[in-house]
Amino acid sequence: MRSFGNVFLGLLAVSVVLASGCGGTQLETGAIPSGEGNIPIGRTPVQSMGECNIHIVNGDGTTIDTVTQQQVIYVGAQLKGIVRVRVEPINTKFMPTELVYRIGAQTTYTMNVRPADQAFAIRVGTVGANLFNGQAFRLGVPYSIHSFVNGMTTHSVSPTIFVSGGVGRLEQNDVFVPTQPGVGQIVLQYAGMRHVYGIRVLP
């Protein structure tokens, strides 16, 4: 892992062994970032596709490079504002995925990242879910998101889903749990296609 700027001072509270990785410095397999919080911000299906290099750029330009650890994407410090996350599977059968979202009060498990399989990404039509724009949710009441990817070669695939605005978290099975009143977005992405749903969380 590497960091630049005062925001991420103290990320390495204990020594870790660094190895040269694809696209930047990466944390050695099995190690977890140590520092302020060790925040699990999302998941990737490493059991089926292998580990991914993760590149995170904070709103102030600070960069973190790491790898997924047992399906979880960790960061060692509090992120703020607009964050750009790029997930690059080491297995080149899968496409890189990049998402940009706004950090809010909820930072833990805000995304379930599922990079597209090259074989199923050729003719993607649309992505969506059982949601509508402007949908309101009650604080603390879970909602199961059922997503879909339409296209001739997209059977048995699921899109990346993330929550922007810090108004809730995503469980592993795409259950959205509203945790903070306010406005935000639930975004679905797959192979370059994207659908954004504006949402509200009510007290």
Image (cartoon, rainbow, N blue to C red):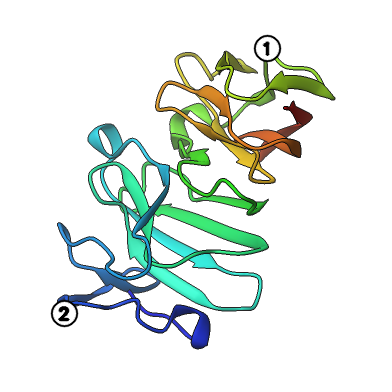
Image coordinates of residue 145 in percent, x first then y, are 58, 17
Viewer-proximal residue among 94 and 9? 9
**Amino acid carrying mark 2 in the image:** Ser
Q: Quadrant of the N terminus?
A: bottom left
Viewer-proximal residue among 91 and 180? 180
State whether residue 29 is above or below residue 113.
below
Mark 1 falls on what kind of element?
loop
Q: Earlier in the sequence, mark 2 or mark 1?
A: 2
Q: Is residue 172 left or right of residue 163?
A: left
Q: Residues within 10 Å of mark 2 (few under 14, many from 20)?
A: few
The residue labelled by disc 2 is 15
**Amino acid carrying mark 1 in the image:** Asn
Image coordinates of residue 187 in percent, x first then y, are 67, 35
Image coordinates of residue 120 in percent, x first then y, are 49, 27
Viewer-proximal residue among 139 and 126? 139
Viewer-proximal residue among 107 and 92? 107
The quarter of the picture where residue 151 lies is top right
Q: Extreme bottom residue here?
A: 5
Q: Which mark is residue 74?
A: none
Residue drawn at point x = 23 percent, y = 44 percent: 70
Q: Quadrant of the C terminus?
A: top right
The residue labelled by disc 1 is 130
